[in-house]
Image (spheres, coloured by chain):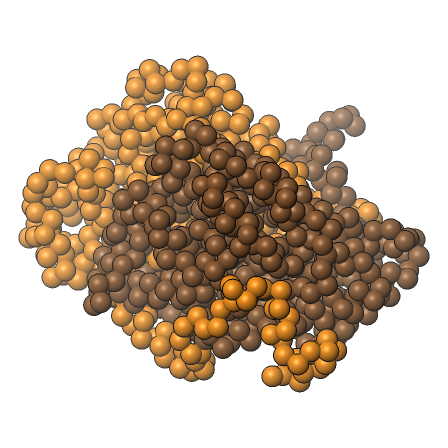
Chain colours: A brown, B orange
Amino acid sequence: MPYHQAIFDEPIITDIRGRRTTKIPRENEDYDAEIPAIMKRDQIGLGDREEFTVIRHFVRLSEMNFGVDTGFYPLGSCTMKYNPKINDEIANLEGFRMLHPLQDASDIQGALKLMYELSELLKKITGMDEITLQPLAGASGEFTGLSIVRAYFECRKELETRREVVVPDSAHGSNPASSHMAGFEVVEIPSTPDGTVDVEKFKEAVSEKTAAFMITNPNTLGIFEDKIVEMANYAHSKGALLYYDGANLNGIMTKTTPARMGFDIVHLNLHKTFSTPHGGGGPGAGPVGVVEKLKDFLPYPMITFDGERYYNDYIPPKTIGKVASFYGNFAVLVRAWAYIRMMGEEGLRDACETAVANSNYMRKRIQEFMQVPGKPIKKHEFVASSAGSGMPKAGDIAKHLIDNGVHAPTIYFPLIVPEALMIEPTESATKAEMDLFIETVRQTLKLPKETFESEPRNLKVTKIDDVEASKNPKPTMRMARKSNLRLVQQVI
Amino acid sequence: MSNDLTDILKELNIKSPDELFADIPESIRTKVLGLPPGMDEDALRRTAGEYAGMNKTIDQQHSFLGFGIYNHFVPAAVANVIGRNEFLTAYTPYQAEISQGLMQALFEYQSLVAELLDMDAVNSSMYDVSTSLGEAARMARNITDKDEFIVPAYIHRNKRAVLDNYAKGAGIKIREIGFDERGMIDLDALGNAINDNTAGVYAEYPNMFGIIDTNVSKIKEIIGESRMFVAGVNPISLGVLSPPGKFGADIAIGEGQVLGLGLNLGGPVVGLFGTKEQYIRKMPGKIMGLAKDHNGRIAFSMILQTREQHIRREKAVTNMTSNQALMAVAAAVYLSLLGDSGLRKVGKINMGRTRQLIEIAKEFDATLPYEDSPVFNEFLIRLNESKTFVNRIARKYNLIPGYILGKEYGFNERNTVNIVTNVTERNTDEDFNAYREFLREVA
């Protein structure tokens, strides 16, 4: 059933003014703030309005937004699986919600137990020896992992010579960005026509100068890098560490582990593989697992258990410090814990198998009318290309899909495939939903180019002038007003 | 196996999904991970309830614990909006036309926070205030091409630890300046500390001791145009306190947890991040912008994406991909609900109630090291007792008197306990009574 977007001409909240009806505690008591003159605020500029007005406004905005609970959402590399509702309920329990991070460990034994247990579960899933739950998102996990790489070589007095992180050209953009942020130089290596790392080129690139090799497996084409053990052994023989970007774990979960493949450091995206809601871009959580020899470098505090009680004060001897203010995104961790406990090993295996079967089904059907680069057997996702043979651009296909009630896949990624459509159905898709998507894409390819010029037609807005929006940026109402003022002045 | 999966396997001409994993070498395949068996929803609910029940919540005691995360009132309407499935379960709005609702909400967050901070541009969220500070130091370095960053000796240790990590990778050296006798930034020391390598200076108000540091207003003048002034604020204080924009801040950051996000053991929260118009292209994070569609209608666009990792890769201004978008929406709802009058009110209540508790402390002649300096909703109190004793008496009254500063802050005198006590609008008269009884025994 295609999606039809609600359309409201909803003003900006600061332009909606009225009377405040939300009462705060001690509303009717009179207090005077004694503030030094220089620090006294005069006007604020938010305006007041009624609570019901605020609710109506945000409900209308929400109705102009598509989520995984609205429909099939096959964004490649994002793992938009269904987020079980019980997880939200549990995260909102008073006993979890009303905890302060600086409370004594004796007050928060249940929370520490949950986090400890989640670490143990993730250790089993990844095969790593220790886990920190502190990183706040996938990229935060990458930065954590690469900071550990840095500290490890600093400790071995090799950091001066090990300046490079090797990444495949198909890598997520955050991999090179995180490497750079941790102070490394990035060396990119090409892929072969079958979509996997060119092992010869890999061996040329990896040397005593390499600090780490960073890769996701299955890779961004959805292909399992079957030479991974050979690459791991080679990198290790040069003294480098192996970093596993866990964004694509859903494609192999329970079938193998990063440890088995030879990885030393792993980050996971709990908001992908472990069903925590994406929240329109976050919050996520990016726990990092490491092998034994890197345990001492993990961020503090680590949660420990002596068989009776849980503790939150262990500082690893060579710790990199901290990557977040407190324990990380605790409410996200609670949801992931709930998901894994409810699924159990069988449930996780079933999720992975269904996701991979769905992906291969869609790949097989789409391959009938589009190029799908790389080996035929895929994992959780695959990439189709509309390059050549007069097919529409990937961007046009995407806009046509959303205009016709079907959410678009990720487009123009990975960068190594021209006109890429990156499709990841996840396990949360019925055959009917996948068939509707496939059929809509098939029909789209037959359309004359002119069709796309005026699309989308059925949504709140049509094509947006992104170039102008970035050339003359208006990220806030006050900058928009300034900009209008400038325009008016120019006219005068 | 569901009907659909049976059909799909038939279409793929395979008997078992396991055949789709044949490309994983046998030598690295796993048979059993050893995870516990799954549970039904009801059993899970019961287990989770047990775990939650093992915790003693802030509401089950008299709590004056703040120090970075604050126990403010959260209107029910906030949870209601961020529980909307369309927001909760959406991805980053890469397909703008089908995500206009969220993009407008984030644009409104940016607009509201810009008013609050009195800054031109605000991004659509950082992870937390600590990472905001780390990114601010990197941004100052990028703008000035200088590599020293000055911070107060007294800032939250966790904030500093995160900053140190960010600084390391970027080759930034962190220098510290102390406080004067009023617990404010030592402006003479600042004048001496800046040099040709100074990229920026960070200072906060209220500071780690809760003091409304009036010296912050003079920093920009001292460091000049060529160095970045990064101001740290508690956003809920800005209903009554001057915004950082007024003091010439080039970058303003803050912990948005206080804006209706609740406690949640400290996460998820949201890092505020704002800057001046001329630096917007150096600002990290995703930014929503007001735009027009091809028919001239108002629309929202994710602007300046060429700064970001998915396009610029290693040259990106930050590696950030996921952010805290939903928490930004929560903050927008909170600010909309309270508005100017509510924020003023909540600021006055926090200051007034804190003042009342300070008066109680004075009744007992407790040592208040910065007694004459104005505070927002936290103050430092010094007790000449052992930590063990203080903790025992606190427990006796079911009280958390605040955060006890330890040797990590240079407080290591024996038989002296330094506590940062926080008071919010949620603290009741019963809480105050518990604090009074506590002081009667320890002060």
The residue at the point 48 percent across, 54 percent down is A262
The residue at the point 23 percent across, 37 percent down is B409
Question: How many numbered discs, if any?
Answer: 0
| Position of the C terminus of chain A by quadrant | top right
Return the x and y of residue B417 as percentages of the image width and height. Answer: 13, 44
The residue at the point 55 percent across, 39 percent down is A206
Q: Can residue A42 be seen at all in this image of the molecule?
A: no
Q: Nearer the viewer, residue B418 or A11?
A: B418
Left or right of residue B351, residue A245 in this image:
right
Left or right of residue A110, residue A74 in this image:
right
Left or right of residue B98, residue B108 in this image:
left
Q: Nearer the viewer, residue A363 or A439?
A: A363
Q: Can residue A112 be seen at all in this image of the molecule?
A: yes
| Position of the N terminus of chain A by quadrant | bottom right
Q: Nearer the viewer, residue B126 or A416?
A: A416
Q: Please tell me whether residue B408 is drawn above or below residue B196 in the rendered image.
A: below
In the rendered image, which quarter is residue A330 located in? bottom left
Return the x and y of residue A28 as percentages of the image width and height. Answer: 35, 56
Return the x and y of residue B267 as percentages of the image width and height. Answer: 40, 55
Return the x and y of residue B374 as percentages of the image width and height. Answer: 28, 35
Q: Nearer the viewer, residue A103 or B253?
A: A103
Q: Please tell me whether residue B1 is drawn above or below residue A424 in the rendered image.
A: below
The residue at the point 41 percent across, 23 percent down is B148
Q: Please tell me whether residue A343 is drawn above or below residue A456 in the rendered image.
A: below
Q: Please tell me whether residue B435 is drawn above or below residue B162 in the rendered image.
A: below
